[in-house]
Image (cartoon, rainbow, N blue to C red):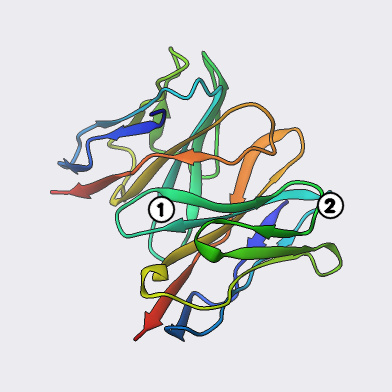
């Protein structure tokens, strides 16, 4: 079955450390997204990519970086510059027309050691 | 700027009672509208969507929503709540020709036995 795979499910970061969250999709979708979810704040957009080798900053891009070298992959790096990285991170994708809904992965929960 | 407002961060109903979750949006053009459900530590699952056509939309698990342009609303309803409906629900909008989505802050539904 097609879908989005996020790994790992749980991740711990030490102070000053960069960590990378994986997101892979086999839906043949062009557009991919990263969201951060904090309690009571809904989903906030970090980065999105509409095509390979191109991506745009979302509303809270500071302290994060992404790459889009392959259509199916959109990894997110949480850098040491992100001072409050503890959150639930969701990856999503959408294909075709903008009337189509996003498909979501099962998320990665990042915590600070 | 687009925005999505979900009234009530927490809603509690008794099993068998009507479920009503409210969503209002601001948009200068007719949007596409979505409702998602999220269970703890999981991604978002699509419940239903409105793109064009009939304004009353039926989704999975007995949920439905009605698009009211004059009220800029897309409220989610279910005639009879079930214990398994306890989850967090998100309303989202996207705009024609823009692969960008805007989410409400979510409503946690509690179902009492």
User: In the picture, residue A38 is in which quadrant?
Assistant: bottom left
Residue A15 visible at all:
yes
- Which residue occupies 63% across, 64% down? B64
State the mark number for residue B15. Answer: none
Q: Is residue A63 left or right of residue B100?
A: left
Q: Is residue A80 left or right of residue B6?
A: left
Q: On the image, numbered disc 2 is attached to which residue?
A: B28
- Which residue occupies 51% across, 13% down? A53
User: In the picture, residue B65 is in which quadrant?
Assistant: bottom right
Quadrant in which the N terminus of chain A appears: top left
In the rendered view, would you say A11 is above or below B87? Answer: above
User: In the picture, residue B41 is in which quadrant?
Assistant: bottom left
Q: Gap in Å between the C-alphas at discs 2 and 1?
A: 27 Å
Secondary-structure class at tag 1: strand
In the rendered view, would you say B111 is above or below B69? Answer: below
Q: Position of residue B32 (x, y in %)?
A: 72, 47
- Which residue occupies 56% across, 22% down? A30
Q: Are marks 2 and 1 in contact (CB under 8 Å)?
A: no
- Which residue occupies 76% across, 49% down? B31
Q: Position of residue A58 (x, y in %)?
A: 55, 39
Q: Residues within 10 Å of mark 1 (few under 14, many from 20)?
A: some
Secondary-structure class at tag 2: loop
Q: Residues within 10 Å of mark 2 (few under 14, many from 20)?
A: few
Residue A78 visible at all:
no
- The residue sitting at the right extreme is B70
- Give me the chain letter of mark 2: B
Q: On the image, numbered disc 1 is attached to which residue?
A: A37
Q: Position of residue A60 (x, y in %)?
A: 49, 44
Near-viewer residue (A16 or A94): A94
Same chain letter for marks 2 and 1:
no
- Give me the chain letter of mark 1: A
């Amino acid at each position: 079955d097609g879908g989005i795979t996020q790994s790992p499910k749980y991740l711990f970061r030490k102070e000053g450390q960069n960590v990378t969250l994986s997101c892979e999709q086999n839906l043949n979708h062009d557009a991919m997204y990263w969201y951060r979810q904090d309690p009571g704040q809904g989903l906030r957009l970090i980065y999105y990519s509409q095509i390979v080798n191109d991506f745009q900053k979302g509303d809270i891009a500071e302290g994060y970086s992404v790459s889009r070298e392959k259509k199916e992959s959109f990894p997110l790096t949480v850098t040491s510059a992100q001072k409050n990285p503890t959150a639930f991170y969701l990856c999503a994708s959408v294909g075709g027309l903008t009337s189509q809904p996003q498909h979501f992965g099962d998320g990665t929960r990042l915590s600070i050691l | 700027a687009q925005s999505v407002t979900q009234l009530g961060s927490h809603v509690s109903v008794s099993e068998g009672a009507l479920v009503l979750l409210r969503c209002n949006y601001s948009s200068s053009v007719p949007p596409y509208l979505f409702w998602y459900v999220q269970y703890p530590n999981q991604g978002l699952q699509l419940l239903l969507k409105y793109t064009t056509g009939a304004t009353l939309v039926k989704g999975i698990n007995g949920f439905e929503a009605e698009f009211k342009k004059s009220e800029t609303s897309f409220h989610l309803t279910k005639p009879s709540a079930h214990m398994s409906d306890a989850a967090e629900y998100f309303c989202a909008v996207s705009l024609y020709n823009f692969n960008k989505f805007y989410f409400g802050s979510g409503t946690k539904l509690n179902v009492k036995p």
